[in-house]
Image (cartoon, grey):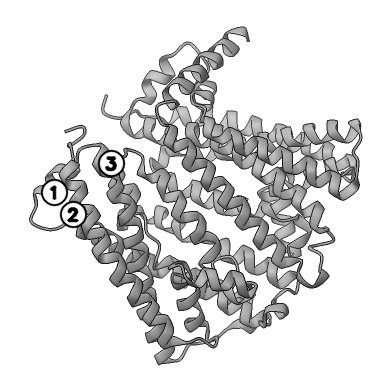
Amino acid sequence: MQRYFKTIRLFWSTAFASQLEYQLNFLIELLAMLGTLLGSVFILSLFFTGGRQLGDWTWESALVIQGVYTFLDGLTNALLRPNLTEIVNYVREGTLDYVLLKPIDSQFWLSVKKFSFAGLPEIILGLSIVFWATIQSVSTFSIYSLFVFIISLLIGFIILYSVWFLIAASSIWFVKTWNATEVLRALLAAGRYPISAYPVVLRFIFTLVLPVAFLTTFPAEAILGELKFNILFFGLILSTLFFIFSRLFWKFALKHYTSASS
Amino acid sequence: MLEYRIEIALWALSGVLPFIMFSLWSQNDVGNSFGLNDIGLARYFLSAFLVRQFSVVWVVFSFEEDSLSGRLSPYLLQPLHPLFRYIASHLAEQATRLPFAIAIAISFFILNPSSFWLPSLPQLFFAYLSTHFAFTIAFLLQSLVAALCFWTEKSSALERLIFVPYLFLSGLLVPLSAFPSNVLKVAMLTPFPYLINFPAKILSGMPVHIFNGFLAQILWISILVPSVNILWKLGVKRYTAMGA
């Protein structure tokens, strides 16, 4: 276990050093992030024109969801995208062989190799929005709801990671998965809005098939103190299943790995 | 292109965003506040989806790859401008995408039978023409960023600075008529509304100033063509043939 922590530390300190060379990138990411946030808050405000509500969510509580989305988007930009989009290249160029030969779990290696520090401001900003909007909405929150919030964020992140990893792992067969991650990104964008704002069919899909609801709506409900305990329980089971499935799928995929150019 | 059928099907699917937005706007009855009933909304977003399918551009990503791997050097030696190579590959993929786009349109009509409509021939013609213009503008905008590849290695990061305003101002998420008038005025000064909103309005049969729209599209093209040309020429002088 200690070996894994040490590896992460080494990975991320080299990542930090190499990214210092691209400071302009950092600035661009920051600008893009602010633009995205401004735009999505603006679109969200269009739903509330004329004193309307969005699927029984008030303006402030809907902003909590935006905050959670921004936070997870930051994590995606920092960790998931840099690592998981590389898997395709390893498969295509045959360099996955070297990863598999390393004396460390290959899924672990592939998932944490890189860390993009440009995602950090988004993570911080997302959390700030969550707390600010929560205070605007319900004036205060208990330690208990903070605890439930952290658990449900963890659930959301594990689900998000597993789905990304599943798609990335399928590159063993398809070699190109860039478009599959685009589909995923488009669908995840649905998480910007509360799940109750969608038609019934989509609500069902976004809860059980592609659990977008667990990513943003439920953590937001948690911090607002509205999350039902059985949903949290269900989320724990679901995220465990997703994670186990991603591992099994990776093992299965590796059996089909034929390597390239070697 | 035909070898990557799954790829292209996925591409077509990755355009689902307008449909997600449609379900939100119609479910929450917001359409009325910007003068569109459910049928109008459905037609607008299906049109937006179709326009996007035939105007989406990724030249900056191909170009960055070619430039970093040194593949660009032989292209530069050829007597044809390298950008034409990318134009050709974009057009080829648009053609292969047509059947998937039709399939998605048909499934949309099955799910929302009341929204079914067939645009009249002139509507279809003008929508076709304006989508091509939209593609041209989007392509030129990205080429402008791609040309920056000659200065910085990571110009795909710069592409995000175009993508963000495109996402919110093009009309992909909401018809622009929903914008408050002061925001709308600013948005209309950018090229983005002419990329989705204008062609989609024509196709879905919403009232639109066809003449003004085309004028603006042509104006943007005539600004962008020389800019790309100049930046490209300056860039090629700096080109150091990385990786070759």
Quarter of the image holding residue A95? top left
Residue type at mark 1?
Leu
Q: Residues within 10 Å of mark 2 (few under 14, many from 20)?
A: some
Q: Residues within 10 Å of mark 1 (few under 14, many from 20)?
A: few
Residue type at mark 2?
Pro
Residue picked out by circle 3: B151
Q: Nearer the viewer, residue A53 or B1?
A: A53
Dot placed on the residue nearer the N-terminal end, 2 or 1: 1
Dot 2 and dot 1 residues touching (CB under 8 Å): yes
At 45% from the left edge and 27% from the top edge, which residue is drawn? A255
Residue picked out by circle 2: B82
Q: Kindly state the secondary structure of the residue where label 1 is placed.
A: helix
Q: Kindly state the secondary structure of the residue where label 3 is placed.
A: loop
Quarter of the image holding residue A126? top right
- For disc 2, the chain is B
Residue B28 versus residue A224 in the image, above or below: below
Q: Which mark is residue B76?
A: 1
Front label number (2 vs 3):
3
